[in-house]
Structures are given as C-alpha cells and as structure tokens.
Amino acid sequence: MPGRTLSRPDRLLPANKGVPTRSVYHFRLLLKLVDEIGFHLAQECFWYNPAKMPMPAEWVTVRRVRIKDSVEYVWWLSKTPHPKANNRTVLKPYSADMIRLNQRGVRVMTRPSGHNIKASFDQIDAGIPGNVVEPDSADDLLKFGNNSANDV
C-alpha cells in the first residue's frame, strides 16, 4: 500500500461552496482509500463533541438554515479484511438500567430488531461500548434504544 496514490485527487474537492448543503469530501476520501489504496473499513465511529463551533457560521447562525454539527467521523481502517482487535480491551461497566434488568432476571425473547436474548445474557458482567465516543453527560444526543428497558 505505501507509495500508492489516489487517481484524480481533484475529484475530491468540495463542490458546494456558497450553498448550505454539506460537503461529501470525507465520504469521497473514504471511498478512494478503500477502492484505490486497498484499505478496509473495519468500523466507523462518531466522536460526539457538544462544544463544536457552529460552522459554517453563515448557514448555522446567520441564515439559520442548518443545525450545528456535533459529531466527527472517526474511521478505523485496516490493511487487511481481518483487523487485529479484541473488544474485551474496551469493555465498560454496565449502566444502572442494565444492572437492574439483570437483577430482575432475563426474559428469553426475540426483540423486534431480530436479536435473540438467551438465558445466559445476564452472565456477562460488562458491556461492549457502542461506536459513539461521548462524554458521560451527553444531553444533546438523541438517544432512542430499541428495547423495553427505556420505554416510558
């Protein structure tokens, strides 16, 4: 992979200067890195940054036709289709809701999402984090779980 270059880098340039729509430059770059350089997209993560500046100011704070971006894309690229990783190294303690659910006992079921909840579900003592890197007090994120643990 070293030494390979992207063909037609001019096609990566943002093409929407002066209009309120977003640039897709980062997506074009990702596709070129995968298609032309040979990287493999192992995972995309999102860095939640509530302190991010409201940019571009013309469209967010002056004309008010866009909302403020609060996330950044973080792409984990691998040189091979089988990245070397182990998610056991990034486990997080269970939330209070998950601990409460485990204490009540697990109801074997298939969720609407198609996930099968087995009787052994409560034998796990830590959670695998999601792909949003967020502070503990992320009040601005829209959070809608697909489970009965957070139903009204």
Image (tube, grey):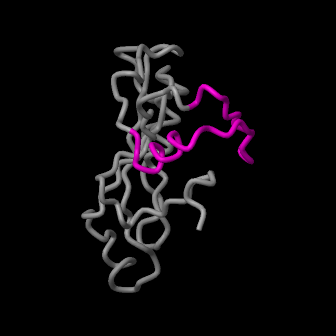
Q: Hey, which residue is sitting farthest front in the picture?
A: 104
Residue numbers of the magenta segment: 94-121
Q: Position of residue 127 (x, y in %)?
A: 44, 34
In the image, 34 versus 41, the foreground residue is 41
Looking at the image, residue 53 sits to the left or right of residue 78; the answer is left
Q: Position of residue 52 (x, y in %)?
A: 27, 63
Looking at the image, residue 115 sits to the left or right of residue 82; the answer is right
Against 104, residue 117 (above or below) is: above
Against 48, residue 8 (above or below) is: above
In the image, 149 versus 106, the foreground residue is 106
Q: Position of residue 13 (x, y in %)?
A: 42, 50
Residue 98: say if magenta: yes
Which quadrant is the N terminus positioned in?
top left
Residue 146: say if magenta: no
Looking at the image, residue 23 sits to the left or right of residue 92; the answer is right
Numbered disc total: 0
The residue that appears at 38% across and 64% down in the rendered structure is 69
Determine which quarter of the picture holds residue 62.
bottom left
The residue that appears at 53% across and 16% down in the rendered structure is 81
Which quadrant is the C terminus positioned in?
bottom right
Q: Position of residue 143 (x, y in %)?
A: 49, 60
